Amino acid sequence: MAKKSKKTKKEEEFWTEEHEEAEEAEEPVEEVDVSKLKFTKIKDLKEGMTDVNVEATVDFVGETYGKGYGEAPYAIGFIKDDTGEIKLTFWGDDIKKAKPKKKIRVILGSVSEFREQLQLNPDRKRGVEFL
């Protein structure tokens, strides 16, 4: 029998069957054979690219934001490889795992530009893989 996590009184007030259905409806992340992937170097990333795979090292992780009620915590960081560096946002539990010099992998990410600076966006379901 599956054990339900205990919720605080405040959480119970806002929790509905709709939330439970949404949690159950989440599809599992499809497994990817990493040995068959092509990895892109950071210097070759361009705005608008999608489904890019990047292996790099965490260079810097900034302050955590979004700690308020109902907000998803995030931290802006930079990753680098032997060709350059790019901005990447770490979300949720990935923030604690993201330490300088830690190797990571982004699978099926996308590249966008914000304030004239390129950024790599991890796939929302996959997040960042720490190696």
Image: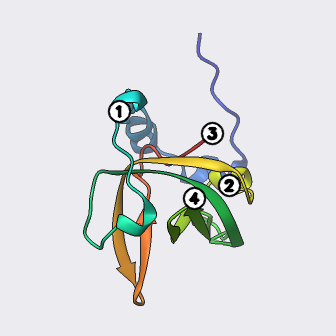
Q: Residue furthest top?
A: 1
Q: Residue 37 at x, y = what percent?
A: 34, 37
Q: How many angstroms separate mark 3 from mark 2 (CA)?
A: 37 Å
Say which mark, if any, is on residue 109.
Answer: none
Q: Please, what secondary structure does the residue beneath circle 3 have?
A: loop
Is 35 placed left or right of 12 in the picture? left
Question: What type is the residue that disc 1 sits on?
Answer: Glu
Q: How many angstroms separate mark 1 from mark 2 (CA)?
A: 28 Å
Question: What type is the residue that disc 3 sits on?
Answer: Leu
Between 109 and 59, the residue placed more toward the observer is: 59
- Reading the image, the residue beneath label 1 is 27
Q: Please, what secondary structure does the residue beneath circle 4 have?
A: strand
Q: Nearer the viewer, mark 4 or mark 1?
A: 4
Residue 33, picture quadrant? top left
Q: How many angstroms separate mark 4 from mark 1 (CA)?
A: 19 Å
Say which mark, if any, is on residue 10.
Answer: 2
- Reading the image, the residue beneath label 3 is 131
Question: Disc 1, disc 2: CB below 8 Å?
Answer: no
Say which mark, if any, is on residue 91.
Answer: 4
